[in-house]
């Protein structure tokens, strides 16, 4: 099975702390790497994580609050200093486009690569990126500014060939792709060999949903139903529910409610308020509702 990993670069909220960086993650799937959010300090976290700058093909910004995008222009500049030539795709709310290109005009002279901006509609769930191995779609969220999450879905793969059976029936290599596509086989003696004897079932496609920032949405579970892993902001504990409602954030308990109702495989908590020196209170609160909950932290890697 090809790697599908989530690299946590930052999981703090707006106020910087000595423990947490602002929001940023890298999704690694089948040799491709995509960044979600790019808060201040993301470049340093890339270095610490030993993630090659040249491997990042696209950046997906959820919304235009500084703790989710202040690191973008610095990273674009650094890519230029490193001699990048491959284009970089940036997906973000439309209001960022003019500002980003103006920053590039002021600070990024002589770039030898193209930055292509893709304006997204944060009010619709739709596929905004697709290649041979995955799709990426938006997840409408409810925050103080237009905001959306992102859902990464792995495309189904072919079944696994049973090499011993291929050898036993002396099936030529030229027919392997047909066998993977579901073809049966007939031997030279006329024996019919059903496809099920020649292949093992394909791996179950995996999926990852990133939801930050948002107030609790009772229907959100319908949009992320059954995903392998869900990252849902958990800025506050229930004792700060008033603050969560006021600032359009979620509590750890509410994040767990989404995970439970969506029947996801695993829940990652993050976007912690700076008031918490020990996030175990958030984890314990989430586990009361959804037992397979985990705290995210800088430099952690989660495999799907």
Image: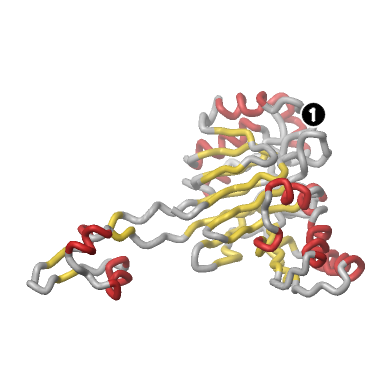
In percent of the image, x 76 and y 27: which residue is there?
276
Residue 26's spot in the image, x, y percent? Answer: 65, 52
Q: Nearer the viewer, residue 110 or 64?
A: 110
Q: Nearer the viewer, residue 218 or 89?
A: 89
Q: Which element type, helix, strand or loop, lies under badge 1? A: loop
Q: Nearer the viewer, residue 254 or 155?
A: 155
Residue 1's spot in the image, x, y percent? Answer: 43, 53
- How many discs mark residues in the rendered view? 1
Looking at the image, the residue that sits furthest to the left is: 189
Identify the image quadrant of residue 245.
Answer: top right
Res. 139 visible in picture: no
In percent of the image, x 84 and y 69: which residue is there?
101
Question: Is residue 262 positioned above or below 116 on the image?
Answer: above
In percent of the image, x 77 and y 52: which residue is there?
43
Crowd tier of the residue under label 1, counting other residues whose Cα lies within 10 Å: few below 14, some 14–19, many 20 or above: few
Question: Is residue 231 positioned above or below 123 on the image?
Answer: above
Residue 293's spot in the image, x, y percent? Answer: 56, 33
Question: Is residue 6 positioned above or below 92 on the image?
Answer: above
For residue 89, side relative to residue 294 (left or right)? right
Residue 237's spot in the image, x, y percent? Answer: 69, 28
Q: Which residue is mark 1?
A: 275
Q: How is the image coloured?
A: secondary structure
For residue 136, side relative to residue 109 (left or right)? left
Question: Is residue 198 positioned above or below 101 on the image?
Answer: above
Identify the image quadrant of residue 102.
Answer: bottom right
Res. 19 visible in picture: yes
Identify the image quadrant of residue 213.
Answer: top right
């Amino acid at each position: 099975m090809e790697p599908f990993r989530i690299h946590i670069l930052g999981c703090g909220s707006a106020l910087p702390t000595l423990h947490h960086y602002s929001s940023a993650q890298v999704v690694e799937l089948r040799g491709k790497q995509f960044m979600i959010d790019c808060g201040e300090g993301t470049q340093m976290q890339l270095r610490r994580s030993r993630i090659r700058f040249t491997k990042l093909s696209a950046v997906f910004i959820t919304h235009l609050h500084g703790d989710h995008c202040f690191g973008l222009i610095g990273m674009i500049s650094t890519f230029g200093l490193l001699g990048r030539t491959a284009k970089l795709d940036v997906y973000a709310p439309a209001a960022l486009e003019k500002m980003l290109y103006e920053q590039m005009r002021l600070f990024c002279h002589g770039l030898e690569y193209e930055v292509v901006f893709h304006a997204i509609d944060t009010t619709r769930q739709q596929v905004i990126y697709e290649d041979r191995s995955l799709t990426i779609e938006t997840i409408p969220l409810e925050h103080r500014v237009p905001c959306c999450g992102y859902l990464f879905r792995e495309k189904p793969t072919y079944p696994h060939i049973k090499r011993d059976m291929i050898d036993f029936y002396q099936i030529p290599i030229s027919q392997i792709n047909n066998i993977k596509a579901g073809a049966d086989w007939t031997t030279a003696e006329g024996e019919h060999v059903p496809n099920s004897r020649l292949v093992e079932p394909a791996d179950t496609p995996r999926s990852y949903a990133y939801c930050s920032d948002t107030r609790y949405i009772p229907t959100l579970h319908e949009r992320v139903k059954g995903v392998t892993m869900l990252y849902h902001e958990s800025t506050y504990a229930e004792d700060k529910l008033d603050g969560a409602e006021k600032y359009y954030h979620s509590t750890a308990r509410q994040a767990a409610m989404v995970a439970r109702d969506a029947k996801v495989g695993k829940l990652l908590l993050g976007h912690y308020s700076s008031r918490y020196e020990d996030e175990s209170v958030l984890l314990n609160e989430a586990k009361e509702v959804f037992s397979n909950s985990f705290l995210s932290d800088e430099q952690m890697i989660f495999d799907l």
